[in-house]
Image (cartoon, coloured by chain):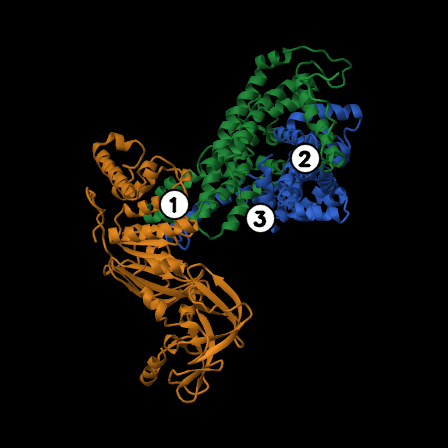
Amino acid sequence: MPDSGELPATKAVRAPPRRRGHGAVAAVLAGPALALIVLFLIGPLACVALLSLTDYQLGAATLNFVGGKNYAEMLSDRVFQKSLTNTLIYVAITVPGSVLLGLGAALLIEADKSLRAFYRAIYFLPVMATLIAMSIVWELMLHPQFGIVNQVVKTLGFARVDWLQNQSIVLFTLCGIGIWQSLGFNMVLFMAGLTSIPKDLYEAAAVDGADLAIDRFRLVTWPMLGPVTLFVIVISAIRSFQVFDTVQVLTKGGPNKASEVLLYTMYSEGFEFFRSGYASAVTMVFLLFVLGLSAFKVFVLDKRVHYA
Amino acid sequence: MAATGAGTPAADGPARSRRGAVALRQISKSFGRQSVLEQISLDIAPGEFLTILGPSGCGKSTLLRIIAGLEVQDAGSIAIDGQPVDHLRPAARVIAMVFQSYALYPHLSVLDNIAMPLRLSRLNLLQRLPGVRYLHPGTRRVATEITQAARQVAGILRIEDLLARKPRQLSGGQKQRVALGRAMVREPRVFLMDEPLSNLDAELRVHMRSEIAQLHRRLGTTCIYVTHDQAEAMTMSDRIVVMMQGVALQVAPPKAIYEDPSDLRVARFVGSPAINVLPGTVAAGSGIDVLGARLPLAVGLPVGTHVTVAARPQALSLTARPAGPSLTGRLVHIENLGSDLFLHAGIEGVAAPVVVRHDPALANMPGLGDMIAIALAAGRMLVFDGQGRRLTFEPEAAAARHVHA
Amino acid sequence: MRGMRLGLIARILRHIVLMTMALVIVAPFVWMVLCSFKTQGEIFSAEINLLPHTWAAVENYGAAMTRVPMLRFLLNGVLVTLVIFLLQVLVNLPAAYALAKLKFHGRSALFGLVLLCLLIPAHATAIPVYIMFYQAGILNTYASLILPFTISVFGIFLMRQFFMTVPDDLIDAARVDGMSEFGVVWRVMLPTAVPALVAFGIFSVVAHWNDYFWPLIVVGDQALYTPPLGVAFFRLNDQGTGYGPLMAAATISIAPLVAAFLLAQRRFIEGITFTGMKA
């Protein structure tokens, strides 16, 4: 019996026909990628977090959850402390060095037309030449007795230096190689930034009386390059945190852990001693820094920097 | 002229202006093998508003930039107020420039943008370091004067309430005014403007045209203005230089450019709708034959020479019974703009339709497709030779001309 | 400024500074090649010998190629990088297309996942993947070198950006013509994406040719060594006795990439920096 206040039940209205959704096709097209993302990216990421809470060793039959024991061990381990400090020092030196030199090179190269392609090619070579091979060349060049570098140093009247053998110096030597390898990368990024500065800003500055190069730099170049510079610094830092090749080939973290870095510690714990749980904890620390920087870059910077 | 010292801006009335005379002699410029300017010579009187008018690529912007000192000419000389400036940098020439894209410093406020030229010229490098103007009393005094001058200029342009904003927060018209302010604040001898209105929409452009013209009258500074828009040139200038392909075709006041063009290209470039161009041949007995119509104009060239006869739409008229020289054609299009009416007629022997101005109030309106007769007023025809140079008529024919005018 | 060039003194100074830095930067390359032509005695002499007195190029390069299977290493490099790139195209291009042009439930979730994964550095996932391969018994195989890199979220991201600029009309026209979505991906989208693919390809090939970390941990068999491993191995085994051949080996291992770079500088730089910015 229908109620006075209620509407009679209306016949269900068929929804207007929708455009055929592409769900099935999309599943096939994106399916493999999704599966691989889970298998090789998300899954392992979650595993690393979990493993860091275990005492798993590769090939062991059992796995025990030990909570924060790995982290406690890590934080009190002298080797880890040294590793973390070294990595931070490495980043603190390599980033400013390669950014400033890259900026300087970009400014100088863009200042005039002659020989641009030549300089750009040379400065970029270290970026793409296999670092392992070039590290071995550097090793020869830095040889205490017979390396060309020391021979030049001696000719200039100074005492020879144990570039890779001296504990106090080895990290800085590696920083030097790191700067050598990455300044070309930063240079190219800066060059893109410089060429995107509108030319008429410089002309307006000239008409306004900015005759000195320093005036043009302060009035036009630096403000326009600001966002790019921040971007380059963050990218440089991300790359620097991942230093590994040079350490593994040249010093193996020595002498006496003077050049031990985070990824090397992760490598030796995880793939030489096969202490997967502990190595995962080290990885988590590594991730903390790199993920933090990457997130900053993506969420803050990528919106502000536009490349043509 | 001495460089600006720590002069105080006029506290009342418009900014003190300088009226520089500019003399260009044989300015030539090539980029690689491409010749962009060919021996341009010009004398610009103090306080004059001169427009350099021409299509894109004619070299007008290059000429302006050479006057500014942003480009160096390959040959020729420039003098301002009798003083050669060829080797002076832009700022030393005491000129100011307004760019097409305004070129405002994006990270500075409107006030800082306007004040920048003064800061660069009156404060040395040390004084411009951040913080110095708060510490050093001498610097502070000069800095205050500069800010005052900037505010005053902003007042003239009515942008005082925008002083704290950054360029990205401004509309096109506002940015335009900031650019003008930055140019004015230096009290230059010459204003150079490179198509400053082309980035504005049509309505704003018309409005800014009159604003700039008024500003010029108020300040009295010499102004060299570059544009491809002939309406701007016609309405704002004391004189116009029409340039094409690096050559200055004619330098004259707007009226003369319009009524008395010295080159066919000038006649075609100026005027809307465009001038009608008809082929003519010099005929026996002091006349010109245009597609069968005989114009009684004696040009003193051998019979059979090909000439071009150009007629503005208002020099042609619809006639029911042709009395003098006339053409017939089929009406293919009617353009009714409300205030004006233009009839497009297709005439044999002429590729493009001939445009005739018709008074909308008259009763005899033909219909589309009708054949119409177009009277040619011989006195208002412009005749050009085979190379496009303007031909003048001889006295006897002038007497004959008056009969038909 | 257009048309304004530096004064003569400034230009000379610029060249002095740039050239000096260039010399420092190119020094290792030059030294590497020079030493590959020298005898051990000359390399390990107390005096500075810039140019070789005794020409030992043939012996050194010969030794480099024979003492270790250098050719094999190079071929491995080529094989691994090419297969990685091909598989990357096969896996990631369709996914990028789906994200760019198809409507389906979960599209934004998937894209969010892609964005999230962009943040993950390669080394972070090494341990679990290694364990996984160990359990699967495929450590020390080509598969272990190739598989983890077939997924490239960066490739998906890049290609999606690119695909979004392709007009929908083009795709609809193809669909009306009866083309399946697969056809659209491979016959419509792929040809338009060639420039972006080239840039990505360069980035991928260079990154994986130069990769040391992953091959180091998964490969033990000399037959599978990629060029970086090969050179490192050479050094390990010929400690102190064969620097000439070692330099020759280093030269050989970087030669292909450097040659390609010098031939197509601009493309390389674009490929590595603008795409590599995300890495």
Subunit that carries the residue with mark 2: C
Q: Nearer the viewer, residue B274 or C264?
A: B274
Say which quarter of the image contains residue B163: top left
Identify the disc placed on residue C266: 3
Is B394 rendered above or below residue B269? below
Q: Earlier in the sequence, mark 2 or mark 3?
A: 2
Subunit that carries the residue with mark 3: C
Q: Where residue A175 appears, x then y in whole percent?
A: 52, 31
Frontmost of labels 2 and 3 is 2
Real-space CA distance between mark 2 and mark 3, rounded to the nearest whole angstrom: 23 Å
> Residue under circle 2?
C152
> According to the colouring, which chain is orange?
B
Q: Where residue C156 appears, x then y in whole percent?
A: 66, 37
Q: Is residue B72 visible?
A: no
* Labels 2 and 1 within one chain: no
Real-space CA distance between mark 2 and mark 1, rounded to the nearest whole angstrom: 48 Å
Q: Is residue A86 left or right of residue B89?
A: right
